[in-house]
Amino acid sequence: MYFLLRFFLFRLSAEKAHHLTLKLLKWVVKIPGNIRFMRKTYILQDKKLERNLWGLHFKSPVGLAAGLDKNAEAFSELSHFGFGFVEIGTVTPLPQDGNPQPRLFRVVQDKAIINRMGFNNVGLQQVIENIKEGRQKKGGNIILGGNLGRNKITSNDNAVKDYITGLKGLYPYVDYFVVNVSSPNTPNLRELQEKEPLTKLLLELKKVINSMPRKKPILLKIAPDLTKEQLDDIVEILETTDTDGIIATNTTITRDGLTLSKEKIKAIGAGGLSGQPLTDKSTEIIKYLASRTKRPIIAVGGIMNAKDAVEKLKAGASLVQIYTGFVYNGPKLVADINQAIIASTSI
């Protein structure tokens, strides 16, 4: 069923297909009986799927990565596909259009996506209203993560203010937070991954969290382009700042693993690469991090099938997230991963 839909979606530009898919999803769940059908088809319930982390109970370890439901418009509808959690965003304090179009590209022959979206979103206040609306719907009680970023017009020197604004604004409405300093599509953002500014940023955010009546977890999302020395610094920063976990990894700025011609790669231009070319690189980073920290890891990057997800969990991840794999394979991928976890004897 999904592959028939994909046949038509892939004849549209990637961004048009993205928006149309969200609209279709909101329409489909309004048809009587469809929610029941979706949940019966895609949701698996088994004790082997359940995870307890940071005081949160995950019914499944499979989540949807940030970027698909940027504005918290469809998380309740997406919950009917068997996800254990959905991460919204990246959210910035002010609305922004992001980078000029076209900015989202499929590389079908390599099962990959290249994007330079640039944190396009409707802004913090509208996202809050969307979450309130979504929480009222069936499925709206799903665990929700808030992925935080800075506005493009905000300098790195003032970035802390943007992240604090996002944290405080979303605090009553989401279950965990993600600090995104690893997107390659906002100018100079990745400089915040350096030791001194990152330590300062995380300490300030933890200070806000520790002042709240109920503490919520905060995680750091890192790029896959870090050296081992930089990863060691990340682990040290996690310990110093008492950051609750790590998401590994964001998109890569390399073009390793693409079979696309150099001319076509050049024509696409800048942006972060996700999907199958990132699979092994992401897993290697997870293994390395897991050998150096006990803090939970959420794995993301190149999970295109159930085998990829199981390998990430065996490498040391506690949870997994999908995005590009979901675009290429549809909701059946969630059920396939959950089924493989249930069948596994080693995770």
Image (spheres, rainbow, N blue to C red):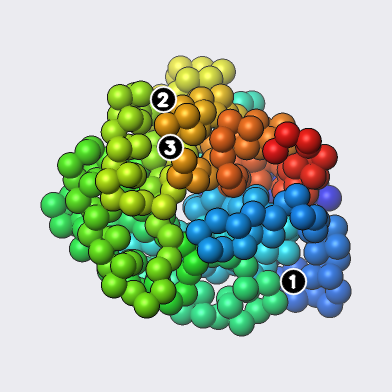
Type of residue at label 2?
Thr
Towards the viewer: 161 or 263: 161
**Of 191 and 320, which appears nearest the observer?**
320
Q: Mark 2–mark 3 contact, CB under 8 Å? A: no
SS at circle 1: loop
Q: Is any part of residue 43 visible from this angle?
A: yes
In the image: residue 291, left or right of residue 20? left
The secondary element bearing badge 2 is classed as: loop
State the residue at coordinates (61%, 52%).
63
Residue 251 in which image quadrant: top left
> CA–CA distance between discs 2 and 3?
26 Å
Q: Nearer the viewer, mark 3 or mark 1?
A: 3
Kind of element beneath mark 3? loop
Residue 192: where, in percent of width, then height?
A: 24, 44
Q: Amino acid at mark 3?
A: Thr
Visible residue check, residue 269: no
Distance (Cα) linking label 2 and label 1: 39 Å
Residue position for label 2: 254
Residue indicated by mark 3: 293
> Is 277 rendered above or below residue 163?
above
Query: In the image, which disc is placed on residue 29?
Result: 1
